[in-house]
Image (spheres, rainbow, N blue to C red):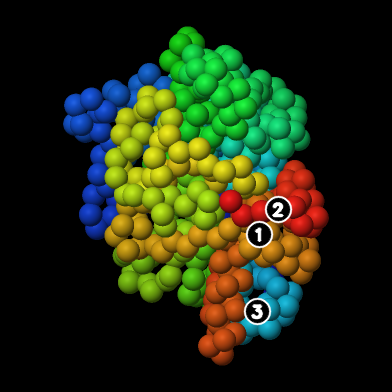
Amino acid sequence: MSTSTRFTLTQKQIPTHWYNLLADFPKPLPPPLHPGTKQPVGPDALAAIFPENLIRQEVCTDRWVEIPEEVRDIYALWRPTPLLRAVRLEKALQTPAHIYYKYEGGSPAGSHKPNTAVPQAYYNKQAGTKRLATETGAGQWGSSLALACRLFGLECTVYMVRVSFDHKPYRKMMMQTWGAEVFASPSNRTEFGRKLLKEDPKCPGSLGIAISEAVEDTVKTPGTKYALGSVLNHVCLHQSVIGQETIQQMELAGEEPDVIIGCVGGGSNFAGIAFPFIHQKITAGKKYRIVAVEPSSCASMTKGELRYDFGDTAQTTPLMWMHTLGHDFIPPTIHAGGLRYHGMAPMVSHAHDLGLVDAVAYPQTKVFEAAVLFARTEGIIPAPESSHAIRAAVDEALAARQEGKKRVIVFNLSGHGMLDLSSYDAYLAGQLTDE
């Protein structure tokens, strides 16, 4: 094997197509349902909030979907992203395992989210949309969409979960720097927000609530469409550039992974790293163990039910087949704000149901323990969300040490934590608790 610890591609090797797992599922994904009739809904049910070109991607079953050249040109601002081997972490753990991480924190917004924000803004611009409304948890998605809207000349309104709005002011400042307007959710701008604030003026908010506000804003405002940063099929499709690059880079490293790991909240970064490997698992018989890692306080895959549920708290979306804790679930105010969602992407839920992926959950103190170890060995301060994947990778490496066997581990480091330092301050001061 090469002694290099960093494996890079050229801009010419940015994927030319997105990969669509819907084409390869051995059993079809259950369709979304109308909440009243309980009958499958067609593309028309989404027309009020999404442009037609993105709706076509949402229901598309082609295995490969061409990436527009204008999108690839913007991707080249930060893609291809590097794959690195964490040799210092391996040494600290005294493990025979080889640990690799795909680093998505080098994008302008500091996470994987621009991989879908850019094409969503592009397709909306093509469709004549003037303004996009969205929600954001910790702010990675909101900042990414704000950037993408700026690049394509669209207005942007973001409903940011109140607890993150208060705890992560610099994310709000990033969005505003790129021209977006940002409101704490629940807000007084929507009927649903006003209703919740009347019931509980101190409501911390949730992604489900913020989605409801953004959707209400969309349907009531001419020229506006809705953009979602996770969960839906077209979002998972756009993120597949991560795993496609990783497969090429593992070939450069001369190794075949045994375990592929990603954190999960709504499912986008996990889909990005995992789905191209699931393609190889299904079509080439690969024996990968693919692990989704969630917070134990908001554990839809390990503690929730697999059933039809609404994607938002106000029950305005079609019913989706997903792992869910219930659309009215208000998660504890953990620091991994991007993982505080009651449900899981239907495609990720279906992959788990088919036995193609496993799921584990960790409390936040164990997650931050691994995050600090990673920062002190590899130098990168990871986002709290991404640190869930680090925790699982560390445990896989420790298991390899106990067994005395080599194990090749690759995980998605989906973003940096430079705007989450208040979380680290709480952990290092011994003030972080497990909900």
Question: Which is nearer the N-term, disc 1 or disc 3?
Answer: 3
- Residue extending farthest to the bottom is 404
Numbered label attached to residue 157:
none
Question: Which is nearer the N-term, disc 2 or disc 1?
Answer: 1
Find numbered disc 3 in the image and state the secondary structure of the residue it sits on.
Answer: loop
Q: Which residue is mark 3?
A: 2
Q: Which residue is mark 2?
A: 432
Image quadrant assignment for residue 356: bottom left
Mark 2 to mark 3 CA distance (whole Å): 41 Å
**In which quadrant is the N terminus drawn?**
bottom right
Amino acid beneath label 3: Ser
Q: Residue at x 77, y 46 (%)?
A: 422
Count the numbered circles shown. 3
Q: Give residue 347's position: percent from left, percent from top.
A: 36, 48
Find numbered disc 2 in the image and state the secondary structure of the residue it sits on.
Answer: loop
Foreground label between 2 and 3: 2
Residue 145 can be seen, yes or no: no
Mark 1 to mark 3 CA distance (whole Å): 36 Å
Amino acid beneath label 2: Leu
Q: Which residue is mark 1?
A: 365
Image quadrant assignment for residue 411: bottom right
Q: Give residue 363's position: percent from left, percent from top.
A: 58, 58
Mark 2 to mark 1 CA distance (whole Å): 7 Å
